[in-house]
Image (cartoon, rainbow, N blue to C red):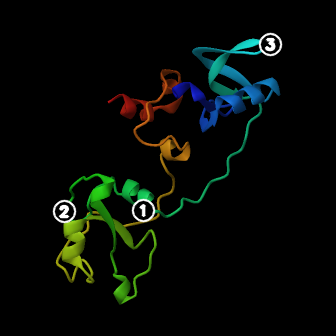
Amino acid sequence: MVASRTLLLNTTYEPVKVISWQRAVTMLVLGKVETVRTYDSVLRAVHISIPTPAVVRLIDFVRRRRMRIAMSRRNIFYRDGYQCQYCHRRLPARELTCDHVLPRSQGGITSWENLVTACGPCNRRKGGRTPEQARMKLRHRPSRPESLPIEFALNLGTGQALPDSWRDYLGWVAAVDAA
């Protein structure tokens, strides 16, 4: 249910994270946030009724520390644009693999700088060789990304519809979702 999620903004109107409407109401009652946008539904209690918060903004600025990005299969695929780094085909995640540029059998380690996205046929063709030994060319040299896009940071998930009330605060994520 879309109305069960509330977008939390910093005082500067930049997205911080997605929280439950219950947590948003608690923060509202404690005076920690103000309501920016609401859903059409209304929350009712014995002596009070308030519109369900869709977007809330923190009253006090919260400094966010820079987070180190976890190396995962999902993040490797995202960094490489879900595209095989050898044949350049864009494929769904279920048809992709992670390939060690310098194979583990030759001393390669599992790191951001040694993993690339590869389709199954290209990964099998390369086998336990380096791209040069297999006469295959890498599209991009792998590296550690500096940041993740907003939908990963907010943990929005894929395939979920974004509420219209969030679109002004999420920038290009909303444009991608609308397409």
Left or right of residue 86: residue 2 = right
Q: Is residue 174 above or below residue 108?
A: above
Residue linked to disc 2: 87
Residue 72 location (% of width, % of height): 47, 62
Going 25% across and 71% down the picture, which residue do you hit?
123
Secondary structure state at the residue bearing disc 2: loop
Badges 1 and 2: C-beta atoms under 8 Å apart?
A: no
In the figure, residue 5 lies in which quadrant?
A: top right
Is residue 10 among the parts visible in the rendering?
yes
Label 3 crowd (10 A; few <14 / some 14-19 / many >=20): few
Is residue 141 among the parts visible in the rendering?
no
Q: Amino acid at mark 1?
A: Arg
Going 40% across and 38% down the picture, which residue do you hit?
159
Which corner quadrant holds the C terminus? top left
Q: Nearer the viewer, residue 114 or 2?
A: 2
Q: Earlier in the sequence, mark 1 or mark 2?
A: 1
Residue 147 location (% of width, % of height): 51, 53
Q: Amino acid at mark 2?
A: Cys
Q: Is residue 127 above or below residue 156?
A: below
Secondary structure state at the residue bearing disc 3: loop
Q: Earlier in the sequence, mark 3 or mark 1?
A: 3
Residue linked to disc 1: 73
Residue linked to disc 3: 46
Q: Nearer the viewer, residue 49 or 138?
A: 49
Left or right of residue 136: residue 72 = right
The disc label shown at residue 15, or none: none
Q: Earlier in the sequence, mark 3 or mark 2?
A: 3
Label 2 crowd (10 A; few <14 / some 14-19 / many >=20): some
In the figure, residue 55 lies in which quadrant?
A: top right
Q: Amino acid at mark 3?
A: Val
